[in-house]
Amino acid sequence: MKTKLSARVWASFILIGLVGQVAWTVENMYFNVFLYNTISTDPSYIAAMVAASAVAATVTTLLMGALSDKLARRKAFIVAGYILWGVSTLSFGFITVDAVGAWFPAANAAAAAAGLVVVMDCVMTFFGSTANDAAFNAYITDVTDSSNRGRAESVLATFPLISMLIVFGLLDGLTQQGRWRAFFTVIGLAVSAAGLIAALLLKDEPLERKDEPYFRNILYGFRPSVIRGHAELYVAFAAYLVFASAVQVFFPYLIIYMQMYLGFDNYAIILGVVLLVASAVSVASGGLIDRVGKLNIVLPAAGVMLAGLIAMYFVRSFVPVILAGIVMMGGYMLVTAILSAIIRDCTPPDKAGLFQGIRMIFAVLLPMVIGPYIGAAVIRSSGATYEDLGVVKNVPTPGIFLASAAVLTLVAVPVLILRKKTRSPQ
């Protein structure tokens, strides 16, 4: 029987989910540009920041997801987390090489500033992961079921790209003008405001308060007996690991690639068109995913993304880049929605919070360690550089898309295993 989600639930998805993704867009894409443009062009700093943030996100989600399950509360974590997430995001506007040089005169100012950005990224990630990765993701699992998750996830999957469109369309001009303080202030205030609104909008679902020891529950998902008992869930996690690693090979360097390699000053227009079309495809596919079956459609969706990645390697001019980008990002959104829905279907409903940390290991920690370092290695091996005021700077090259495509092909292995397991008699 198909369950209909209420208007209040949809409103919570749209407000909290979309604003959270706006904050993650800034963290995932603009922190890299901020670091590259204002502090250092060494891609190793970007890779280190992405990896450190991934570790912070995973550890936070393990701890806070288990705590939200034990207390049988999601709302308090979401509200407080969003408010502090906004405050910590706003603080980035005050980090400059000159300011850090004044604070630590004995240190290398650029290196110290880069280190401070990495540390503050971890602080911001703690609040963001508490609110979004741990509590909000568990809330989504609480209020949906297998009959409506395809539709819900197809909408939720559009938020990362819609958030990019919002940021690129409304705020990217501030970054191009070097007005980073204003940029981070606007984003920070918006995220904190979403936390205040969530206090009025959200209603905790009736959950059973857990009496199990808290620290024992943190390690719940690592127990061999739990892994064996939920084998399909862990194979689905493995599929997401491969997919997300492929995305992270190129994604942290995408804006820099369009700016510095393709020479597009108007990259916001390209991204805007790509994101609008890809988002429309994702929303329209929600009912199809539920009807056809998630496991039946995931590999064709991955094939669409693969074709887009290969096309991105060859295209150089404005319109071809838009067309290749639509194929690439359309496939990306479909795979995101399908794999996310499969993971929710396989997650025990009474332990949604406990498994959020495990999900983060496969969806964030490992991909954000593996992918960016593959991308950085490809960039360095290409030898593509330019000189700016006597400083030699590395430039991302099209090889990042071929490397991403090579990683993505491996997703077929866990998907085929999952198909076999779900069709075998239990």
Image (spheres, helix red, strand yellow):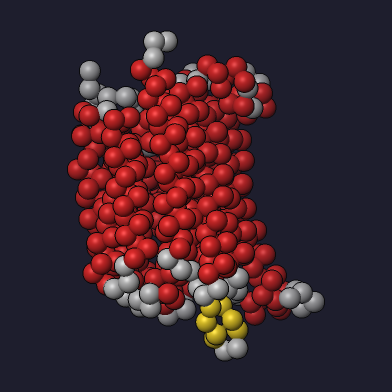
Q: Which residue is drawn at 23% across and 69% down?
A: 319
Which quadrant of the view contains residue 203?
Answer: top left
Residue projecting furthest to the right: 106
Q: Residue at x 69, y 71 (%)?
A: 111
In x, y percent, where is residue 43? 58, 67
Q: Nearer the viewer, residue 160 or 315?
A: 315
Horizontal side of residue 205 vs 55, given as left or right: left
Residue projecting furthest to the bottom: 389
Is residue 158 positioned above or below 265 on the image? Answer: above
Is residue 257 positioned above or below 62 on the image? Answer: below
In x, y percent, where is residue 73? 49, 30
Count the marks: 0
Q: Which residue is drawn at 63% across and 22% down?
A: 223
Which quadrant of the view contains residue 183?
Answer: bottom left
Q: Residue at x 31, y 64 (%)?
A: 271
Q: Can residue 101 be seen in this view?
A: yes
Quarter of the image with the C terminus in it: top left
In x, y percent, where is residue 378? 53, 62
Q: Is residue 193 visible?
A: no
In x, y percent, where is residue 216? 66, 23
Which quadrant of the view contains residue 422?
Answer: top left
Horizontal side of residue 199 vs 224, given as left or right: left
Quarter of the image with the N terminus in it: top left
Q: Which of 233 and 15 is in front in this view?
A: 233
Is residue 332 positioned above or below 338 on the image? Answer: below
